[in-house]
Image (tube, rainbow, N blue to C red):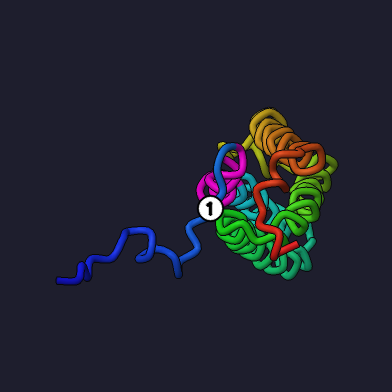
Amino acid sequence: MANNDRRMDSLYSEYDTRHANGFLFVLFLWLVAANPLLVVVTSYPMISFYSTYMPELGMEWINSLMLIAVILMIFFTASGILLGLALHKLKKPAWILLKFYFPVVQVFYCSLVIPAFPALPVLDNAGLLANSKLSAQYFSTDFSFRITSSMIISFVWFLYLLLSKNGPAQFPRKDI
């Protein structure tokens, strides 16, 4: 009587079972879970700040820019998740695109926070921050901390992408 049992190896032979491990897996978790939260937590208060206070200074045009900022925030969140999933499946283009993703996100953060600092004294002198829970000191400490911590974390991941020898070695040769 012939043995018709199949080995477990043959059941999984048609599936690609290689996935990111080590620091690549941590980077995958960062891109899929933590980075979207950081993008929203860092960007949304700035967008809300601009759309609330700037029109009162006669800068109604800022609302059209805020729509662009919200679209970019959604784009960076979605692209980070998609890059994380591609990285988890060890797709070589994800490794290459991440080297551009982190600096571009940091430029986006800086473009949100840098214009706010010159506006703070103007808002304070106009009395717009007097009845608000948002004071100039709160803004300069809390938002500066968010942006700085985001930049440091992204810079560390960017250095890992540039300097890692083990990261690219995990990718299969067919994707190179």
Give the overall secondary structure of the magenta segment. helix
Regarding mark 1 in the picture, which secondary structure is present there? loop
Q: Pick the residue in front: 134 or 45.
A: 45
Q: Can residue 136 be seen here? A: no
Amino acid under label 1? His
Q: Is residue 147 left or right of residue 32?
A: right
Residue 127 percent location from the top left of the image: 70, 41
**Outermost residue to the front:** 1
Q: Is residue 71 left or right of residue 112?
A: left
Position of residue 24 relative to residue 79, above or below, is: above
Q: Is residue 96 left or right of residue 48?
A: right
Residue positioned 82% across, 44% down in the render: 114
Q: Residues within 10 Å of mark 1 (few under 14, many from 20)?
A: some
Image quadrant of residue 7? bottom left
Position of residue 66 relative to residue 31, above or below, is: below
Q: Pick the residue in front: 85 or 133.
A: 85
Residue 67 within the segment the image draws in magenta: no
Q: Pick the residue in front: 110 or 140.
A: 110
Residue positioned 66% across, 67% down in the render: 71
Which quadrant, please, contains the C terminus? Answer: bottom right
Image quadrant of residue 153? top right
Residue positioned 65% across, 36% down in the render: 146
Residue 29 within the segment the image draws in magenta: yes
Residue 62 percent location from the top left of the image: 76, 63
Residue 136 percent location from the top left of the image: 70, 33
Q: Pick the residue in front: 13 or 164.
A: 13
Report which residue position mark 1 lands on.
19
Residue 119 percent location from the top left of the image: 81, 44
- Which region of the structure is painted magenta? 23-38
